[in-house]
Structure formats: C-alpha cells, structure tokens
C-alpha cells in the first residue's frame, strides 16, 4: 500500500521539518546527458550486429550513434559541471568512482568509435574485407559502448541515499531501453532514401520482432520495478507514489506507458506495412518514452527521511 | 585524535543556536546550513510529541561521498578523520550530493555568493567570508577543524545552551563521548547504510 508517513518537502520551499526531500541537483542537463549517452551507445552497439550484407547501413547507424555520444552527450555533461574546465580531474579515481569509469569509456568510445568508422568505411563502400586490426578496434569500441550504456545506471544504483535508485534493476532497465533505442534507430535509418533495400524483407521482419521483444521486456521490467518499490523502505514507496499518482502521473501513464510502450508495440501491428512514416512515428514515440522514464527516475528520487532510531519509524508505520 | 560527537536528544530544545553559530562562524551563503535541527512530530493525537533532531555532516568512516567523488576532491583528513572538500579539485558533478544519505552536501550555484541583499553589494562580513567559497563546487561542514586543531570545540558545540552536543576524541576509550556511547546505548544515524558515522545520538 502506498502511503505518506511524513510529508513531501517541495524543492523550492525547504523547511526544517523531517520529510521526503527530493534530490534537486541532477536535473535537465544530466538527464539529457544520460539520455544521449545511453541512446548513442545503444545505437552504436546495435550497429555492430548488423549483418555484413548491410555494411552500408551498419556504417550509417554506427555514425549516428557515435555522433550522439561525441556531440550532445559530451556537451550536456560539460555544461552541467559546476567547473567544466576541470573535467579532466574526473579521470583520477577509476578505482572507486563509476563516473570516472564512465568518463574513460566515453573517451574510449569517441576514439575507438572514430577509428572503427574510418576503417569500416572501405568495407561499407568499397567492398573491402575487414582486417584483424579493424575487428579488434570494433570489439574495443563495442566494449566501450556497452560501458557507456550501462555506467549511469550503475552510478545511480551505487547511491545509498535515494532508495528509488538504489535498486539493481536500474542498470538492466536502462540497458534494455538503450538497446531498444538502438534497434528502433536502425530500423528508421534502414528506411531512409539510399539505404532502403540494405535490409531484406526477412531481416526487416526479424529486427521488428526484436524491437517488439524489447518493448515487452521493458514493460515487464517497469511493472516489476514499480512493484519492488512498493515493497521497499518508505522513501521508495514515496517515489512510487510521486510517479504513479501524485506529482508525475501524466508523464508515467501517458509518456512512458501509453506512448513509450503500448503505442510502439501496437502501431506496427495495426498499420501492417513497414514504411518510413510508421518507423519515424515509432522512433519518436520510443524516444519520448525513453526520455520520460529517465526523467522520472531522476526527478522522483527522494532521500530517506533523517531520523535517529528505527523505533521512531515503526511508530510512524503503525500510524499510517 | 579522531573527531566524534554525541548529541543528547533529551536535552535538545530545537532553538537552532547551533545552526546560527555555524552560519556565523563560516559566513555561510543564504539558504545554506551545514548543521540544523530538524523537527519531527511523533505519535497520534492526543499523544503527540515533537522530536528535535540536530544533524550535521557525520564525517563517516566509510563516507559514500568520498567513494563516489571522481576527482578526489572529497577526502578524509588522516589526523582527525574529518571529511573535507578541496575546492580547487571539485568539478561540480554533484555525485557526492546524491550519494550522501544525510543530505549534508551543498552545491554552490553560480551566483550563490551575491550576498543577502542583492543589488546592494556585499556586507563587510560577507566580503570577508565569501572568498573561502567557490561557486560551482560542493561544500560541506568542515567539522570546525581549525578550531579543533587549536584546542577548541566546534562552534555548534560551544554555542549549544543546553549542552546537548558533546565533542571529543573517538579514539580515546576514556573520553567523555566514548563513555556516553557505552553507557547510554548511543545509536548512529542510518547505521544500516554502513557508513560508520562519527556522530552518535543518545536519548
């Protein structure tokens, strides 16, 4: 059952009362940086699994993913920092900080990804055979993309203060969304003029099926995630309450569930024919859903209320 | 010596003298408190009571803020065990802010050091204290380390009118705070987080 044992304290009206304080520092810029990082890395990683016969398509999908990471992701991260020109200091703690590891992976993806694109150009456009060096770089770029895709989820999971984040499902959920974004973008790019025909009918059908599978997986994960929240400590219940009923129900039910999952699952079934218009609509809906879930995860995060003894908590539970 | 504090909740009257003492000692910018006394209401009418909960940085042994810091700006002073921030290293990523379960990290936004009277310049007091801060970085309770090293108690302890806050050496088994911890079954805030706070509560 969802309930409030102490009140929710609005971020713009802080008080000295004990209550659920929302986190107020990770807002728009970090949401955009995480979103672009996961999407770009997901697109890049998926491009590496496109069959060799569609090498031209694989090149453009990899280029799209690389551009999203190298451009907007890095830019949003940079301008988010309080002291942007000290960003290089963020490389000094790989032993303990997942942010540092994420920085390294991002730089590695930018470097290896660029080299991969350069070496893959010949394969895609001149029909050359991939070299062992090219394949090694592709593997390194793929590993970097995987770390970029997953590290921000792990950063959130490692936060012991916000129970909404301190949940091992977060990295899995975010990875699954990143892969779904990657598959959706691949399907969209495959329909662009000049690339139509890179995928055969069977391949198009197979990738559409993969996308639908990921939609179902994400749907299940969101249901499980919300259910686990309602069985956790009160701050997690408060976050679930904020998401489902109180503060952000429109974003959750309309953005995440209706548009981000149900619509993209049903649209291809209802429309039947794969077309650029349909895939563009699905891609836009998928991006909206992906952004909305990340927005909710960051905005609905509340700290556990500060209290001295568990016995006080118990007294309040019995009141609720 | 290892910095430690015991707070007697029975003695705290919620007067916020500690909050003001800290604010005055360090000239903290508007809206920022390194220590404050929270108010909690417990019980069901007519059996209701108010609980005052003084809180400050717990200078944790296993500080999550220090572990998540990607730059090494957050560090523990080895001589005292106080967790500090090196403003020259902090890049303002605020990972420590979201990692601290006690909500005792504060980010200094750009423009936060404009003073209490916007448009009228800084008061002499603000002009003296603000150069110690850096906009775009995270700041926190410094455990009054310079006072402690000089043989004084932290400002919040000295200014508590009811002696609810006791300061001492956690490494000395015969210190007053160690005796209080033993004798009165002191509890650590959110001990379940595994942060090993150096602030204890007794009631």
Image (tube, grey):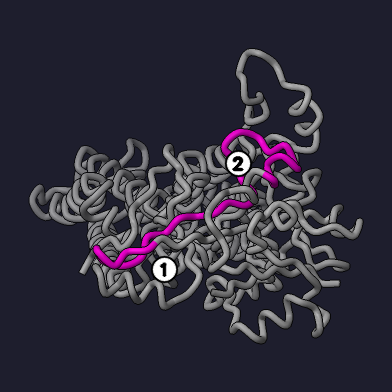
Q: Is the residue B169 above or below the residue B163 in the image?
A: below
**Can I make out residue B75 in this image?**
yes
Which chain letter goes with mark 1? A
**Image location (x, y in percent) of residue A179:** 39, 60
The residue to which callout 2 is attached is: B32
Q: Check if residue B43 falls in the magenta segment.
A: yes
Q: Which residues are magenta?
A: B21-49
The residue to which callout 1 is attached is: A172
**Can I make out residue A174 in this image?**
no
Comparing A199 with A290, the one in front is A290
For label 2, count other residues whose C-alpha is less than 10 Å away and answer few (under 14), some (14-19) or many (20+): some
For label 1, count other residues whose C-alpha is less than 10 Å away and answer few (under 14), some (14-19) or many (20+): some
Element type at marker 1?
A: helix
Which chain letter goes with mark 2? B
Which residue does the image show at 46% across and 68% down from the upper left?
A: A166
Comparing A241 with A213, the one in front is A241
**Image location (x, y in percent) of residue A108:** 66, 55
Most extreme residue toward the left is A270
Q: How many marks?
A: 2
Comparing A78 with A269, the one in front is A78
Decide if residue A300 is on the left or right side of residue A140: left
Decide if residue A280 is on the left or right side of residue B23: left
Which residue does the image show at 58% across and 51% down from the upper left?
A: B36
Q: Check if residue A211 falls in the magenta segment.
A: no
In which quadrant is the N terminus of chain A drawn?
A: bottom left
In which quadrant is the C terminus of chain A drawn?
A: bottom left
Which residue does the image show at 26% across and 58% down from the upper left?
A: A241
């Amino acid at each position: 059952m969802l309930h409030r044992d102490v009140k929710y304290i609005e971020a713009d009206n802080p008080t000295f009362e004990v209550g659920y304080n929302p986190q107020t520092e990770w807002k728009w810029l970090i949401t955009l940086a995480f979103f672009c990082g996961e999407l770009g890395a997901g697109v890049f990683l998926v491009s590496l699994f496109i069959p060799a016969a569609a090498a031209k398509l694989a090149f453009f999908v990899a280029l799209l993913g690389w551009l999203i990471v190298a451009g907007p992701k890095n830019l949003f991260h940079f301008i988010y920092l309080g002291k942007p020109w000290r960003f290089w200091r963020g490389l000094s703690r790989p032993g303990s900080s997942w942010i540092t590891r994420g920085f390294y992976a991002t730089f590695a993806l930018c470097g290896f990804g660029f080299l991969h694109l350069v070496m893959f150009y010949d394969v895609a456009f001149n029909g050359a055979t991939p070299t062992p060096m090219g394949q090694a770089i592709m593997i390194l770029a793929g590993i970097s993309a995987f770390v970029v895709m997953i590290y921000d989820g792990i950063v959130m999971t490692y936060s012991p203060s916000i129970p909404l984040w301190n949940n091992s499902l977060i990295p899995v959920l975010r990875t699954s969304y990143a892969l779904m974004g990657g598959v959706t973008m691949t399907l969209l790019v495959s329909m662009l003029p000049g690339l139509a025909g890179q995928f055969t009918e069977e391949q198009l059908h197979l990738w559409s099926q993969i996308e639908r599978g990921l939609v179902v997986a994400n749907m299940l994960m969101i249901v499980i995630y919300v259910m686990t929240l309602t069985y956790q400590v009160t701050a997690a219940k408060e976050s679930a309450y904020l998401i489902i009923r109180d503060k952000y129900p429109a974003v959750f039910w309309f953005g995440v569930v209706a548009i981000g999952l149900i619509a993209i699952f049903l649209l291809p079934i209802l429309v039947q024919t794969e077309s650029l218009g349909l895939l563009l609509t699905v891609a836009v809906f998928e991006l909206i859903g992906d952004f909305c879930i990340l927005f909710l995860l960051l905005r609905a995060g509340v700290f556990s209320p500060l209290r001295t003894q568990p016995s006080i908590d118990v007294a309040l539970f019995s009141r609720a | 010596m290892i910095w430690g504090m015991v707070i007697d909740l029975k003695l705290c009257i919620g007067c916020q003298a500690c909050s003001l003492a800290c604010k005055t000692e360090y000239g903290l910018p508007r809206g920022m408190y390194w220590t404050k006394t929270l108010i909690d209401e417990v019980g069901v009418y007519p059996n209701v009571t108010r609980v005052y909960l003084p809180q400050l940085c717990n200078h944790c042994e296993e500080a999550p803020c220090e572990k998540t810091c990607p730059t090494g700006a957050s560090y523990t002073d080895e001589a005292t065990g106080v967790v500090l921030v090196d403003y020259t290293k902090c890049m303002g990523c605020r990972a420590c802010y979201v990692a601290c379960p006690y909500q005792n990290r504060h980010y200094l936004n750009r423009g936060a050091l404009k003073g209490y009277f916007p448009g009228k310049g800084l008061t002499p007091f603000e002009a003296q204290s603000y150069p110690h801060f850096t906009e775009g970085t995270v700041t926190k309770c410094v455990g009054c380390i310079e006072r402690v090293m000089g043989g004084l108690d932290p400002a919040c302890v000295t200014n508590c009118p009811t002696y609810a806050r006791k300061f001492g050496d956690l490494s000395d088994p015969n210190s007053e705070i160690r005796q209080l911890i033993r004798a009165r079954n002191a509890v650590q805030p959110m001990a379940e987080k595994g942060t090993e706070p150096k602030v204890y509560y007794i009631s």
